[in-house]
Image (spheres, helix red, strand yellow):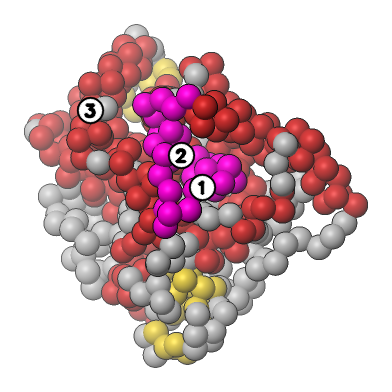
């Protein structure tokens, strides 16, 4: 049993699944010795945690991802004061408003429901279906370049630009800022769940955070004056609980949509292609019948989840799987482990696009089920319908698999492919 397993450690990142299996078998609720996080690894227990917000609060998402694991702000220092002054001067906003702002992924009922409704209108089945022609147009454009290349990076040529362009267009971002969106997103992931975590005043992060929020402030002001048919305007038009959203509230919304709107699909596509190339029998099944692509997408989300874990805060002393969890403890439902739980999925470590994947928690569960899951599924389906036939003539260039350096998201930073000789 990996007694020293810690979900925040990079040690387990390359292949966490053997450790997950040991945890499920021997310590389904495991207290990580370094971080003190209680790791929940079995499917039934993960679902229980995610479906009982009165016991397991989403407040931990703010604590662990946006506040470096601290419940309170960072200690006062000259460096912090300099950052506060720079932020206020550049953005015209109060930096001390962030801890009190409403944040969708960190709220519980009854606040969460009205907040979620503020963006739900942009993700209705009809609105998502309306995006399919544009997604097909983009995929055709990217695939045209891929088909003429002897060697290319799938992440750079398809997995990144497709979701970044779509979410940017949904938010009403001008085309020339789309590369900035990806750069901002990568920097935030680095700072909240990668090597930059715990150093919130890192100068590179300060610069990106100020640049991003200065841009958002301009967009918010424009949409307040002149609403458009985009997600930012839809968010501003909604008053959850009868209370208008502040600029800081809206910034949190847009940051979440930006990051989730591109990282999930990018990593899903990268993981899916690696999965197919690792399992040529499954690739042949999909190539023989492209109507199986939706099954492929669901199996890819289950088999190698693009989001590996979330966090919850124990609101009271409680017990789970026979283990006492004290009030105030941080709990980490391991989504990637739950999706490999043989108690829920037979022969769970085997890739099988024909399996019944219903019940996987790759997009979360309960109140916080991923708002953009239907968009990610659509983007992945359209992209893989075009890409799978091409994989018969492609092979990986080298064996190295460099992953995003994050304890939350999982996916390749690059996926070099070349035409087979």
Rendered image quadrant of residue 374: top left
Task: Name the side, left or right, on which 274 lies relative to 108.
Answer: left
- Asked if labels 1 and 2 touch by Cβ distance under 8 angstroms, the answer is yes
Rendered image quadrant of residue 70: bottom right
Q: Position of residue 165 (x, y in %)?
A: 42, 25
- Real-space Cα separation, disc 1 to disc 3, in angstroms: 27 Å
Q: Which residue is mark 2?
A: 236
Local secondary structure at mark 3: helix
Q: Which residue is mark 3?
A: 130
**Residue placed at 76% from the left, 45% from the top?**
202
Q: Which residues are magenta?
A: 226-255
Q: Which residue is mark 1?
A: 245
Q: Earlier in the sequence, mark 2 or mark 1?
A: 2
- Real-space Cα separation, disc 3 to disc 2, in angstroms: 22 Å
- Asked if labels 2 and 3 touch by Cβ distance under 8 angstroms, the answer is no
In this rendering, is residue 148 above or below 292?
above
Closer to the camera in the image, 224 or 310: 224
**Residue placed at 30% from the left, 41% from the top?**
121
Local secondary structure at mark 2: helix
Q: Earlier in the sequence, mark 1 or mark 3?
A: 3
């Amino acid at each position: 049993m990996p007694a020293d397993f810690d979900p925040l450690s990079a040690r387990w990142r390359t292949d966490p699944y053997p450790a997950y299996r040991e945890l499920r078998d021997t310590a389904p609720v495991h207290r990580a010795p370094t971080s003190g996080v209680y790791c929940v690894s079995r499917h039934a227990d993960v679902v229980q945690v995610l479906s009982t917000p009165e016991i397991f609060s989403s407040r931990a998402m703010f604590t662990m991802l946006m506040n470096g694991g601290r419940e309170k702000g960072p200690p006062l220092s000259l460096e912090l004061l300099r950052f506060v002054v720079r932020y206020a001067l550049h953005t015209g906003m109060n930096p001390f408003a962030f801890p009190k702002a409403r944040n969708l992924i960190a709220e519980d009922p009854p606040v969460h429901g009205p907040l979620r409704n503020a963006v739900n209108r942009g993700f209705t089945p009809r609105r998502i279906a309306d995006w399919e022609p544009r997604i097909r147009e983009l995929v055709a454009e990217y695939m045209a370049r891929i088909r003429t290349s002897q060697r290319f990076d799938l992440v750079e040529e398809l997995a990144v630009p497709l979701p970044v362009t779509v979410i940017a267009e949904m938010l009403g971002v001008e085309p020339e800022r789309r590369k900035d969106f990806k750069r901002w997103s990568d920097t935030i992931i680095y700072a909240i769940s990668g090597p930059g975590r715990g150093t919130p005043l890192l100068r590179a992060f300060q610069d990106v955070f100020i640049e991003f929020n200065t841009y958002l402030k301009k967009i918010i002001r424009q949409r307040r004056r002149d609403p458009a048919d985009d997600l930012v305007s839809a968010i501003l038009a909604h008053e959850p609980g009868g209370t208008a959203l502040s600029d800081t509230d809206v910034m949190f919304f847009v940051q979440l949509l930006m990051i989730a709107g591109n990282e999930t699909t990018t990593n899903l596509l990268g993981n899916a292609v690696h999965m197919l190339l690792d399992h040529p029998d499954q690739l042949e099944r999909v190539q023989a019948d492209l109507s199986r692509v939706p099954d492929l997408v669901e199996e890819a989300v289950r088999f190698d989840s693009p989001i590996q874990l979330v966090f919850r805060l124990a609101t009271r002393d409680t017990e789970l799987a026979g283990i006492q969890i004290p009030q105030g403890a941080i709990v980490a439902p391991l989504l990637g482990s739950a999706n490999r739980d043989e108690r829920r999925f037979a022969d769970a470590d085997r890739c099988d696009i024909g399996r019944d994947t219903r019940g996987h928690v790759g997009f979360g569960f309960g109140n916080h089920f991923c708002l953009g899951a239907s968009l990610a599924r659509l983007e992945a389906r359209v992209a893989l319908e075009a890409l799978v036939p091409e994989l018969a003539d492609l092979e990986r260039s080298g064996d190295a698999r460099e992953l995003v350096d994050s304890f939350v998201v999982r996916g390749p930073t690059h996926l070099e492919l070349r035409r087979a000789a």
